[in-house]
Amino acid sequence: MLVSAKEMLTKAKAGKYAVGQFNINNLEWTKSILLTAEELKSPVILGVSEGAGKYMCGYKTVVGMVNGMLEELGITVPVALHLDHGSYEGAKACIEAGFSSIMFDGSHYPIEENVAKTKELVAVCNEKGMSIEAEVGSIGGEEDGVVGAGECADPEECKMIADLGVTMLAAGIGNIHGKYPENWAGLSFETLDAVQQLTGDMPLVLHGGTGIPEDMIKKAISLGVSKINVNTECQLSFADATRKYIEAGKDLEGKGFDPRKLLAPGAEAIKATVKEKMELFGSVGKA
C-alpha cells in the first residue's frame, strides 16, 4: 500500500536523518530498491521522472507494477511513489494514475505563476492525502536534457513557496544532477541554513545526491535536509556490473544470455548502492 511521503519525512526531519529517493527505470530497479528497503527496514521513496515514466509505458503501468510488487514481495516498510521534476501536466497525470506523491517543478516559471500553480496542486494533493514537493532556484546539471549551473535559491522565495502548504521543499544550494565537474564549488551551507531558518519544520530536499562527499551529505542532514535523491549512482553501478559480466564472457556460457541471468549482477549492484546510501542517510531501521 503506497503512502504519502509526509509522515516519513516529518519523522526524518525530527530524527535528523534523511529518506532516500531512488529513481526507478524498470522492473529490476524497482525490485532491487524495494527488497533492500525491506531488508534494512528503511522507509523509501521511489522517484519517477517524466522521461522514465514514458519509457515504462506511462504512469498507470508504473503504478500497477509497484502496487503488484508491494503485495507479491510482502513489503511492510513505508513506500511512496513520487513524480520527480514534474511539469504541471505531468503532476496532474500522476495524481490521476494513483501516485502517492508528486513534485511540481515550477522553478522555470516567473515566481507568481509558480505560486499560482503550486497552490492549485497543493489543494488537490491535500484532498487526496498525497504529498507534494516544490522547487525554488533551479538545480544544475542535466535533468532529462535540461542543463543548468547549480544556482542558489533565494531564501525569501523559499519561504513564500513553503507557506503555500507544500510538504517538502527542494532549494538549490549549488547542487547539480549527474556527475559533478572537477571545479565544483561544493554545497552552499549558508543558503541551506538561511532557508531552514525561514522554513522551520519543513523537510528540505537535496537533489543530485550522486557524487556529493559524505561529510557534506551529513552536514546537509544536520541542517534540515530530510530527503536525498539518488539516480545516477545506481545507473553507474548497474552499467559497471553488466559490463563486467559481458566482458567476462558469462553471457556465452550455458544460458548466460537469459535476461534473468544477464541482468542479475546489475540488479545486485543496485542493491549494494542503495544499501550504502541508506546507511549514510541514517534511515536504516527507521521504518
Image (spheres, rainbow, N blue to C red):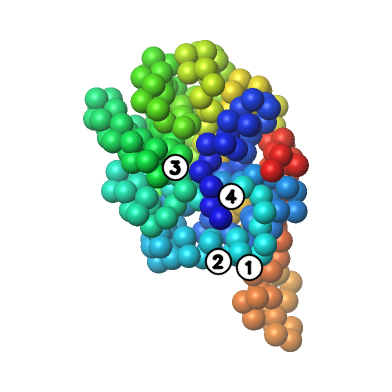
Q: Secondary structure at mark 4?
A: strand
Location of the N terminus (image quadrant)? bottom right
Residue type of the residue flagged with mark 1:
Glu
Q: Please tell me the numbered disc located at residue 68.
A: 2
Marks 1 & 3, CB-CB < 8 Å contact? no
* Closer mark to the observer between disc 3 and disc 2: 3
The secondary element bearing badge 1 is classed as helix
Q: Are marks 1 and 2 in contact (CB under 8 Å)?
A: yes
Mark 1 or 3 closer to N-term? 1
Label 3 vs label 4, nearer the camera = 3
Instruction: Give me the C-alpha separation between circle 1 and circle 2.
Output: 6 Å
Q: At label 3, which amino acid type do we have?
A: Gly
Q: Which residue is mark 4?
A: 79
Q: Which residue is mark 1?
A: 72
In-front residue for pair 173/281: 281
Is residue 154 at least partly visible in the picture? no
| Label 4, residues with CA under 10 Å away: few <14, some 14-19, many ≥20 | many
Q: Position of residue 169 (x, y in %)?
A: 46, 29
